[in-house]
Image (cartoon, rainbow, N blue to C red):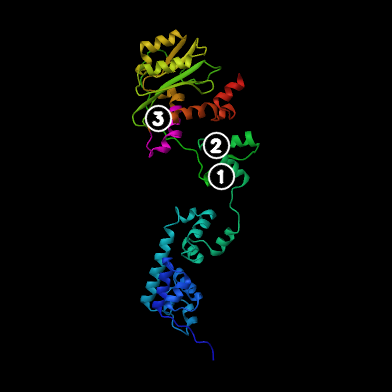
Amino acid sequence: MGEKLNVYSEEIKRRAIEMKLSEKFTNQQIMEQLGIRNKTQIKRWMKWYRSGEEYRLSQPPGQPYYFRKGSEKLSEIDQLKKKVEYLEIKNEILKKVPGNREELVPEIVLELVESLKNVYTVTMICDCIGVARATYYRWAQKSWKPTELEQQIINICKSLKFRVGHRMVKKLLKEDFHVKVNRNTVQRIIQKYNIQCRVKPKRKSKIAGVSRCIVPNLLEQNFKADRLNQKWVTDITYLPFGNSMMYLSTIMDLYNNEVVAYRISDRQDKELVLETLRAACNGRETKNLILHSDQGAQYTSYDFQNLAEEKGIITSMSRKGNCFDNAVIESFHSTIKSEEFYTHQKVRLTNSIVLEKIESYMYYYNFIRPFAKFDCLSPVAFRAKVA
């Protein structure tokens, strides 16, 4: 006579599932409390639960094949319950899917299945996200680590703090690694690993004001210089990132875009621009140098004009209300805010931290930041090369 068939009520099966899901009981403890003889039974019930086949918990003894066929023989109410339960599970899985399913690259699918496979079956997860089960296992057998080229691009972007675009990365690959690659390939890799450069917000163009220069506009938007200390540009910008408002005054040499002097103050008065000018002239030949600024009150003051004349500097001013006449220094101030501060808008900064970040960025800009027009050299490196 064969061994007696083990029959467990639906109540016991559901109680076993609840105990297992609580993660407070081992299989042995569940078996002892509920009188279950084999842990395989518990595993089978859990499999039914995770795959949305809870209707099989009420499966009567002696009719396993009938219930394996599916739910076509169930009552209409039971079929609706099963469908609702399946949709709830599917919705729970899709909540964990980033973006939309068209963005599911292999790496994301592998990570998603790995995080959910202890709760749901692989089949259920793949069905919900629209990926074939065989495709998942094929992806799982591959290595998805970055290639040598991808790793080089990642390292370049990290070393420059994600402040350069794909064109500059392409140039650096050629200069530093002697690797020739299409810029579209570089852009695709940068987008794949989400390491794009920080894009500063576009400024709305303004209508140029009427020309009413206090001193002549000697530059006339010609920002090219043939030598050092031939053309300087200067301006003041706001630094609203600390405990209180601060102001940054900067002077830049147009020959190599080097910041020759900068000062920070809590007041945008003439003393701020005078200190900046004195620091810039220290140790430099400034005779017949053109210093271009806007028509701010600090630059039109007698003290500033007298100091410039004393140093042999010829002053030049933009047309009133026309930021394009001083576009280089305007763009620099926009860049420093975009690259150093706008990514930290939700972070509270003290004035001392703002000062440290400005000092750090000025060193990075002068000594490290590569420029395409200087063959990927920094301003200081370019100055040393042509010296």
Q: Is residue 339 shown in magenta?
A: yes
Q: Which residue is mark 1?
A: 189
Q: Nearer the viewer, mark 1 or mark 3?
A: 3
Going from N to C along the chain, the mark reached first, 1 or 2, is 2
Q: Amino acid at mark 2?
A: Ser
Q: Amino acid at mark 3?
A: Ser
Residue closer to the observer: 61 or 181: 61
Q: Nearer the viewer, mark 3 or mark 2?
A: 3
Q: Amino acid at mark 1?
A: Ile
Report the side of 102 relative to 76 (left or right). Answer: right
Q: Which residues are magenta?
A: 331-349
Residue closer to the observer: 74 or 277: 277
Q: In the figure, residue 157 lies in which quadrant?
A: top right
Q: Which residue is mark 2?
A: 159
Is there any visible trace of residue 250 in the rendered image? Answer: no
- Report the quarter where the N terminus lies: bottom right
Find residue 98 and report its horizontal and vertical position in percent: 45, 53
Q: Which residue is mark 3?
A: 352
Query: Dot 2: few (<14), some (14–19), or many (≥20) neighbours within 10 Å?
Result: few
